[in-house]
């Protein structure tokens, strides 16, 4: 099907990276109508695509040659530099930026001078990188991204003849299984009594922080999601909030959610009441004419409450005071999930949605042991037991 001339194409300069020009057009009709985006390094390439679409061609054809092969890369660092310039640079600007940051900050300091040979760049060299990142306090989520970048680079090195095998094959699964100590941390929730004591301590010693921690505890919200929560995304009448952004310390700003999917969450009456109190307090503070912040959670100085710093110290003080030392901010998210599942296993789907998990199996794998398997004094295994009278009759027969 040819592209209708009326659709045309939009050519726009979007940045100063290696692919700063974007061409976007539509094809198809009705339910099959879809948008297509192409990233170009030069305006000339973008205009060529535009001309092809305007001419009504079935598909914009360009002499898009394959990436130049990487040659004479003595070390992994030299190979990575060429790989980033010739292969990765063809991807979206955000992806290019992410690859370069991970390579510069986490990979090249350890692997940069390693010879690009099967013997030198083996499994042990990759495990050493992961162990160093774990020792440096890098989260498991970032470690997975690091390993994927190394694996993608090694796969290209294999395709271009520098390596005969990819040393990262199946390594992510083996590390996740705990063989190298880099597995996901186990949930460490508070008990109901500890959660109540935590909130009571805040009300007595740090009441200004009660709405923030109450929201985390009653919704399972991540710290970054709480930092990016805006008043415009809260519907007090329906007692719901739309989680749409997540604050990233690395990007120093709001980015898309971890699951890449905005979703609504339910707010308890206590949370709604606490947030209304915050809203009224902000109105009083801003009587001097300053514009009110669009963000919900602010410090005493009017700055956003960020995932690190003072909020962690408040949480640590409260945990020490109630005898729950060692618990972290993330444990409030685990507490939300486990207390609801202990109260009613039927809430699994709802808990999974509230946590923003893309698959219910993620929630089940992480919190399955907190789902009760007994009712009253009997376990689920006793559900089909015959009554004692029926057993006696069977014995007499």
Image (cartoon, rainbow, N blue to C red):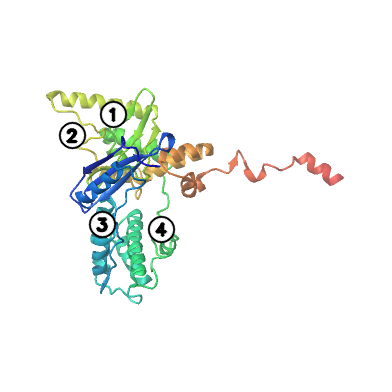
Q: Which mark is residue 302?
A: 2
Where does the N terminus fall, quadrant-wise?
top left
Whether tag 2 and tag 4 are in contact, CB under 8 A, the answer is: no
* Residue at mark 3: 89
Q: Which mark is residue 86?
A: none
**Image side of residue 57 versus residue 391, left or right:** left
How far from the left and from the top, in percent, is residue 368?
Answer: 51, 47
How far from the left and from the top, in percent, is residue 292?
Answer: 19, 28
**Image side of residue 298 versus residue 192, left or right:** left
Residue 129 vertical placement versus 144 (above, below): below
Where does the C terminus fall, quadrant-wise?
top right
Could you tell which of marks 3 and 1 lies nearer the N-terminus?
A: 3
* C-alpha separation, residue under disc 2 versus residue under disc 3: 40 Å
**Image side of residue 317 versus residue 292, left or right:** right
- Secondary structure beneath label 3: helix
| Front disc: 3 or 1 | 3
- Secondary structure beneath label 4: loop
| Front disc: 2 or 3 | 3
Could you tell which of marks 4 and 3 lies nearer the N-terminus?
A: 3
Residue 182 vertical placement versus 280 (above, below): below
Could you tell which of marks 2 and 3 lies nearer the N-terminus?
A: 3
| Front disc: 1 or 2 | 1
How far from the left and from the top, in percent, is residue 61?
Answer: 32, 51
* Residue at mark 4: 183
Q: Residues within 10 Å of mark 4 (few under 14, many from 20)?
A: some
* C-alpha separation, residue under disc 4 versus residue under disc 3: 32 Å
Whether tag 4 and tag 1 are in contact, CB under 8 A, the answer is: no
* Residue at mark 1: 232
């Amino acid at each position: 099907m040819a592209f209708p001339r009326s659709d045309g194409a939009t050519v726009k300069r979007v940045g100063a990276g290696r692919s700063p020009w974007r061409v976007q057009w539509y094809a198809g009709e009705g339910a099959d109508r879809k948008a297509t985006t192409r990233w170009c390094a030069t305006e000339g390439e973008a205009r060529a695509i535009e001309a092809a679409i305007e001419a009504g061609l079935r598909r914009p054809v360009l002499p898009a040659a394959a990436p130049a092969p990487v040659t004479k890369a003595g070390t992994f660092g030299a190979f990575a530099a060429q790989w980033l310039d010739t292969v990765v640079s063809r991807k979206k600007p955000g992806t290019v930026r992410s690859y370069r940051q991970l390579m510069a900050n986490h990979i090249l300091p350890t692997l940069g001078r390693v010879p690009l040979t099967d013997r030198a760049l083996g499994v042990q060299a990759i495990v050493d990188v992961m162990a160093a990142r774990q020792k440096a306090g890098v989260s498991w989520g970032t470690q997975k991204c690091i390993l994927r970048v190394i694996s993608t680079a090694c796969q290209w090195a294999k395709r271009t003849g520098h390596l005969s095998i990819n040393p990262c094959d199946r390594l992510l699964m083996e590390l996740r299984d705990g063989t190298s100590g880099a597995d996901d941390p186990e949930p460490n929730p508070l008990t109901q009594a500890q959660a109540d004591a935590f909130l009571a301590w805040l009300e007595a010693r740090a009441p200004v922080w009660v709405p923030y921690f109450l929201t985390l505890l009653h919704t399972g919200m991540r710290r970054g999601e709480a930092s990016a929560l805006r008043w415009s995304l809260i519907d007090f009448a329906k007692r719901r909030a739309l989680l749409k952004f997540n604050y990233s310390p690395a990007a120093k700003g709001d980015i898309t959610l971890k699951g890449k999917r905005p979703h609504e969450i339910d707010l308890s009456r206590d949370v709604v009441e606490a947030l209304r109190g915050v809203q009224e307090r902000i109105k009083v503070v801003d009587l001097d004419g300053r514009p009110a912040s669009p963000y919900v959670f602010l410090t005493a100085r009017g700055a956003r409450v960020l995932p690190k710093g003072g909020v962690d110290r408040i949480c640590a003080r409260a945990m020490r005071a109630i005898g729950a030392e060692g618990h972290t901010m993330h444990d409030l998210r685990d507490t939300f999930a486990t207390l609801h599942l202990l109260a009613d296993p039927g809430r699994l789907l709802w808990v999974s949605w509230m946590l923003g998990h893309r698959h219910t199996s993620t929630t089940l794998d992480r919190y399955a042991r907190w789902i009760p398997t007994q009712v009253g004094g009997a376990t689920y295994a006793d559900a089909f037991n015959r009554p004692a009278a029926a057993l006696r009759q069977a014995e007499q027969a």
